[in-house]
Each structure stands twice: as C-alpha cells, then as structure tokens.
Image (spheres, rainbow, N blue to C red):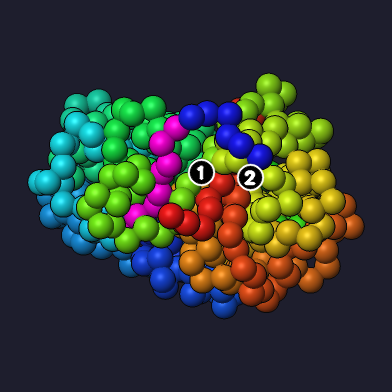
Amino acid sequence: MTSFLNHRRVVVTGMGVLTSLGDTPAAFYDNLLNGVSGIDSVKAFDTTDYPCKIGAEIPEWDPTRVMDIKESRRNDRYTQFALYAALEAFKDSGIDISEEDPYRVGVFVGSGIGGMDTIEKQSFTLFDRGPRRVSPFMIPMLIANMGCGKVAIDLGAKGPNFGIVSACTTGTNSIGEALRHIRYGDADVMVAGGSEASVTKLAYAGFCQMKAMSTQNDNPQKASQPFNAGRDGFVMGEGAGVIVIESLEHALNRGANILCEISGYGATCDAYHITAPDTSGEGLENAMRIALKDAGVAPEEVDYVNAHGTSTPYNDKIETQSIKNCLGDHAHKVAISSTKSMTGHLLGAAGGIEAVACVKSILTGEIPPTINLDDQDPECDLNYTPNTKQTVDVRVAMSNNLGFGGHNGSLVFKRYEA
C-alpha cells in the first residue's frame, strides 16, 4: 500500500511519562511487561460514600521536581504532570532549544478535562467563603490548554500551540495533529501527548453516577479487566505521556537517536451518542483504516495493537468488532493488549502513555499483557496477550483510543529504516 499524501517522514526521538507504574519510560514499560498493577485504594480523598474506591494515583507526587512551591500553587496538578512528562521527553530527545528556530518547535499537550482539582477546590471556596476569596489564578489553572502553554513557556517553544480536547482520545489526537503539522511544514519539532489529574471527589462523583467505574473495591489490582467476562467498568488513572516527534530530515541533520517512525493517523466521529460508542464499531474501524492508509501499511503487516480496552462492557466488545472489521483474518493473528488493565484509564493522557508503550514494543520486541484476563468474554475472541507478556518481532504497532462525544483516533508506529 502507498500513502495518500506526499509528506515528510516523521520520527519519534524522545519520550516522557508519569504514571502509577513509573516516571520513566524504562520503569513504566518494565512494570507493564511484568504485569504489575498500579491500581490501589484511593488515597487522595475519603471514598466512604463512593461506589468506586480505587484508582491508579501518582504516588507521593512532588511538584518541586518541575517548579518551585510558589509556582506550584498557581498551576493545577494536571499542568504539573504535563510539564514533567514534556521536559523529560525533550531531554530524552537531546534537542538544544537554543540551537533551534523557536517558531519551528510546537507543543500539543492536551487534557480531556483540565484542572478538575482546581474547579473542585475553588468551588468550595466560593460557596464557603464568598467570591472575593476565589483565587485570581483560578481560570489559568483550570483551563485545558494551560498544560501546553506552560510547557511552551518553560521550553521557549514558539511554534504551533493549542490544547486539543477530545475526551479520552485527546492524547492520540494531539500526537496525530502534531504529526500533520510537521508533514505540512508548519513545524520541524513537536512535543505532543496528554495529561490528566482527575482522581478527585467531583470527578469520581460524576463518573460513579454514570455507573461507568468498577466497584470491585476488595481487590483493586484485579478490578480493571479488559475483555474479561467479569468486567464491570473502568478504573481511573492519572498522569501524563508525551513524545517528541520531528521531521526525519531535522533528526538526521542533528544526529538524533531515532526511536521509531510515526507514519499514520486516523480520526473519525461516531456521530451516534454523547457517551456510548456506536454498536457497529464503524467509527473506530474507519479511523484504523485511515491510519493504515496514511502509513502505507497493509492490515496484515500490523504486529501489535495497543487497544483502548477500558474494561467497560460495551467498549471492549465493540472495539473487538472494529479490529476484526479492519484487519480481517489477520485480526486473529495479531497481538493485542490493553495496558489499562495495569495503568487504569488516564482519560486525556491515555493516548500519550499508550503511544510510549507502542514505541517501546518496537524497540524491545516484547508485548505487555492484558492482566486479569482469566475468563475471556466469548464476544471478545482475539489474542489479547492474556496475563503474560509475549515476544514478537514488532515492526508495526497501532494505538487506538475512543472518547465521549464519539471521538475515535488511531496512530501507526513503524520500525525506523533509513
């Protein structure tokens, strides 16, 4: 197959993550491969009155790792996470911003919700103490574009910059749109991904009322069960995942360490329901088809699919059908896994950390498992890498994400070949 666009090749040269499983790509992926769960009882607030009492929190987060105490009080937790992951990814890339045209370096680090912790705390302040006690920093703290704004300020990146908001597809859309900006010549380097910090009282209250979250509280590590017959909802996670991508020409000119190529992106909308995915699975199927065509990759060339795999009854079944429809007979041969079984669901940051997982699968030749897959749903009948990692020669990896509003996104990563 050949791509339908004539465009510059784009490569991945840096990665940064902050998750309950680790704050470096190496630690994060090692824990994934070993089937370690980052899910536990929630420590951030009293969950007595909540049906869901579990989550994948960042343990003992210290914002002074990226900013001083005074500044941390003026930046929401999600912005702090975004900055950490972005700075780590940029450091990993080896780019010296002083040697770049800053207007050719852009940032797309989105958030599905933004400053939920700020919204919650400042609402309490308003109702308990009155409007004059609300923080003058409330608005810049809560808006969902401030993560990418803060990253740009700290890096000195003056190129394309805006916060994409597409619920749980945010990280994937941010990376895909960054890819397009480089292809179309609007930037040479893009810092892209997602960040989320929604382990809060208000977020849990809302999701619990939707009955979207798991209530298997007695054994938190077993609660996230993508594709398992006993799954009863997702488990909230928090953190950030960011990658640095650049044109191949730019990377070669500076002697960069090229991790892999990012070669395909597809985005669609179900136009069906505000929260439920289209039962036909056509939206995700077409996003995958578009991404493969964009990458010039045939369905049978895909070696690994990092599934959205939320552990909700509808999503896992519909995503399975989408993969079958897109990949045909090859769907039963390809290795698939849901790393959300270990990380929980990071909402707008999911696509960021799962892109890192795809890159690492290409670099290591090892596929992380879907843990807690002990009684596979008969309607989910593909190879989801149950419970134990697999060794696979990964040349092509796909990452899928779906979001409230009917958003679908798919990315294709390939082993770099000169």
Residue 236 image point, x, y percent: 54, 53
Tell me where the magenta segment starts and ends, as one range: 7-14
Q: Is residue 151 magenta?
A: no
- Dot 2 and dot 1 residues touching (CB under 8 Å): yes
The answer to if 10 sits in the magenta stretch is: yes
Q: CA distance from mark 2 to mark 1?
A: 9 Å
- Residue found at the far right of this picture: 378
Q: Quadrant of residue 339?
A: bottom right
Say if 176 sits above or below 45 in the image.
above
Q: Position of residue 116 (x, y in %)?
A: 40, 40
Give the x, y percent position of residue 225. 70, 61
In depth, the one of 175 and 95 nearer the eye is 95
Identity, as a three-letter code, of the amino acid under mark 2: Val
The residue indicated by pointer 2 is 297
**Residue 266 sits in quarter:** top right
Q: Which mark is residue 263?
A: 1
398 and 116: which is toward the camera: 398
- Residue at position x 53%, y 63% in the image: 362
User: Which amino acid, mark 1?
Assistant: Ser
User: Residue at coordinates 12% horizontally, 46% vertically from top-left?
Assistant: 99
Query: On the rendered structure, is 324 left or right of 63?
Result: right
Q: Which residue is located at x 49 percent, y 52 percent?
A: 355
Does residue 155 appear in this view?
A: yes
Specify few, some or many for label 2: CA neighbours under 10 Å numbering under 14, 14-19, or 20 or more. many
